[in-house]
Structures are given as C-alpha cells and as structure tokens.
C-alpha cells in the first residue's frame, strides 16, 4: 500500500507576532530566573516554549525562545502582550548584564503547515532564519529577517493557521486572556512549557503546587461548533448556567465550522451541554486532544 501524500506546504506571515531581544553575557541566565523554562543550558539546536507569570502563577505571556548568538536570546510572542512583557521583564534586570529591546522591526514571523514532521521545539537554521517545530503534525514557526523573501509555499488564511493551532491543542496568551491561566490550565506543561526541576521564577510555588497537590480543576480542551468565536469569550454549561464554565483561548473557522481551544472546568465535562457566549449560545461538541493529559498525582 502506498503512503498517503504529504499535505502541500503553506505559509502565513504572522503579523500579530513580535520579537524581544535579550542581549548580554547574562541574557540566558536572566531569562532562566524569570520564565517557566530552563534557559541556562539552552543549546543552539532547540527552542523553548516558556511562560512569564505573576507572583500568583498567572500567565502574563507565552513565548518561544532560542539562542540567536552566544550572548543573545530571542523571544517570539503575540504582539499584543509584547510591550507589557518587555516593560515588566526590564524591571527585574537590575545589575544583570542583559539588555532587553523590541526587535519586532528586524524580524518577520511565519507559520508553516505541511513541513516534515519533527520533535516539538527542535530548531533548524536556514541561513539567517530559524525554524522551530511546533506540536501538531507538520507545524513550524519560522523567524527570518524582515527584508527576506517569504518562505516557499502557498499563502494560507489566518483562519487556516488558527484552526491548526486549535487542532493541535495549543493556545497562546493574548490580550484578552492575560492573567487568566495558571500554565497547566492551558496544558502548558504537557506541551513542554514548564520545567519543574529548575530554580525559582515568579509564581513558581503556585505552579508547582498545582502540579503536585492534585488541585487542578481546569484544563484546555478542543471543541467544534457552527458559530464564530473570539478569544476571551465565555463558555457556559447547561447544568450550571449562572456562572461561566470556561473561556475561549484560541479558535479558527473553516468551511463554516469553528474549532475552539478552550480552558474549561473539568466538572463541566461530566454532565450538561456546553454553549458559547451564553447558556443559550451555540452548542460545543468535544473533540479529542491529540495528546494525553497525565493523571493528577
């Protein structure tokens, strides 16, 4: 039997993404002490999925980071959280030999579909560009200099990319969801965004407690519906319509259907129906996640 043909490669300029540069001898160590991932031993063949939390463990931003040079780390993240993240991180630099700047004007961020399968967060270099394998089959983040030609592939729509993001069970913190989630609420640790063996960072105790005390009551799940959805939109359960049961963290529409990645109360999955926007809103149909959620210890 012949193998199924690989999907055609497609690309999209992610104009809603930006880049922060951390430059200096202490750049990696500084980020190591502020983010949920281990940057102190980051090599040049991998990127890091990471979060920046408040002292209460709530995510202010989510990002992908990699070593651009021995004394330089770049962070790619949604532009709507970039300015606040840059400002807050800069408050903690103090005496560290690290300078943080907005480098968005120097780089273009692309999403690619139909690329060869690779382990998530593996980094490859293509001249001045880097490509980071993302969770989900054939998904890649490409960051290149802003003046370079667009990568090969037919241009896809923003909804095609957003659909693939939701289908992969992933979501990024956006303006409407700043401080809405502890990392595990969007399955961030399952996707490789939290290192529980590294040292302290803002919110580390809360994040660790959620992991090891079995207190997590909310998770990211994927749903399908026939109504468009917006990040930050509330979700309601028919069995408990007086209060929201969850919130949309990401969504994409294709062929009249919408795929939603939503943070949801686990109890709301046990009975009743889920509805978008109001107790009488469009019904959400659960879809299986493409990865397993480990049982709470």
Image (cartoon, rainbow, N blue to C red):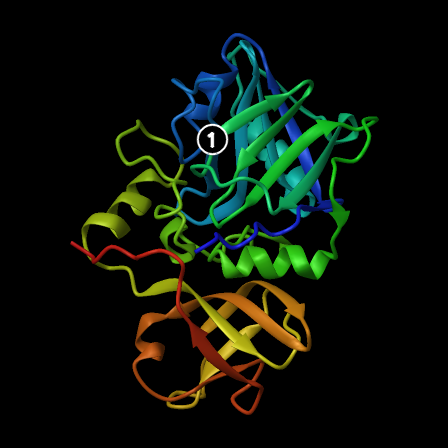
With respect to residue 69, does 152 lie above or below? Answer: below
The vertical placement of 97 against 151, above or below, is above
| Residue nearest the viewer, comparing 73 with 141 | 141
Res 244 seen here: no
- Name the residue that disc number 1 marks: 122
Q: Does dot 1 land on a helix, a strand or a loop? A: loop
Lateral position of residue 162 relative to residue 295, left or right: right
Left or right of residue 287, residue 124 in this image: right
Q: Is residue 11 above or below residue 245?
A: above
Height in image: 15 above or below 218?
above
Q: From the top left corner, tell me how far across and down residue 208 is, in percent.
A: 27, 43
Residue 180 at x, y percent in the picture? 49, 58
- Frontmost residue, 217 versus 49: 49
Q: Where is residue 10? Give x, y as percent.
A: 70, 48
Depth order, front residue of 91/236: 236
| Quadrant of the rendering where the C terminus is positioned | bottom left
Q: Which residue is painted at 48% across and 52% down in the image? A: 3
């Amino acid at each position: 039997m012949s193998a199924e043909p690989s999907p055609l490669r497609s690309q999209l300029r992610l104009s809603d993404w930006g880049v922060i540069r951390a430059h200096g001898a202490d750049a990696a160590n500084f980020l190591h002490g502020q983010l949920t991932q281990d940057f102190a031993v980051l090599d040049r063949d991998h990127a890091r999925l990471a979060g920046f939390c408040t002292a209460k463990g709530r995510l202010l931003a989510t990002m992908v980071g990699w070593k651009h040079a021995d004394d330089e780390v770049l962070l790619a993240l949604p532009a709507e959280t970039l300015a606040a993240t840059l400002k807050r991180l800069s408050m903690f630099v103090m005496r560290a030999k690290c300078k943080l700047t907005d480098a968005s004007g120097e780089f273009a961020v692309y999403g690619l579909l139909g690329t060869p399968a690779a382990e998530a967060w593996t980094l490859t270099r293509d001249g001045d560009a880097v490509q980071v394998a993302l969770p989900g089959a054939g998904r890649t983040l490409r960051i290149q200099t802003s003046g370079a030609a667009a990568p090969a592939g037919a241009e896809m729509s923003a909804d095609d990319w957003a659909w693939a993001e939701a289908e992969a069970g992933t979501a990024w913190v956006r303006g409407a969801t700043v401080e809405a989630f502890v990392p595990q609420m969007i399955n961030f640790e399952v996707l490789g965004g939290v290192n529980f063996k590294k040292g302290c960072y803002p919110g580390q105790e809360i994040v660790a407690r959620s992991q090891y005390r079995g207190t997590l009551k909310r998770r990211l799940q994927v749903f399908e519906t026939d109504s468009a959805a917006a990040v930050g939109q509330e979700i309601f359960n028919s069995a408990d319509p007086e209060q929201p049961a969850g919130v949309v963290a990401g969504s994409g529409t294709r062929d009249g259907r919408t795929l939603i990645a939503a943070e949801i109360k686990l109890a709301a999955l046990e009975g009743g129906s889920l509805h978008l926007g109001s107790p009488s809103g469009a019904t959400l149909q659960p879809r299986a996640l493409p990865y397993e959620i480990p049982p709470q210890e």
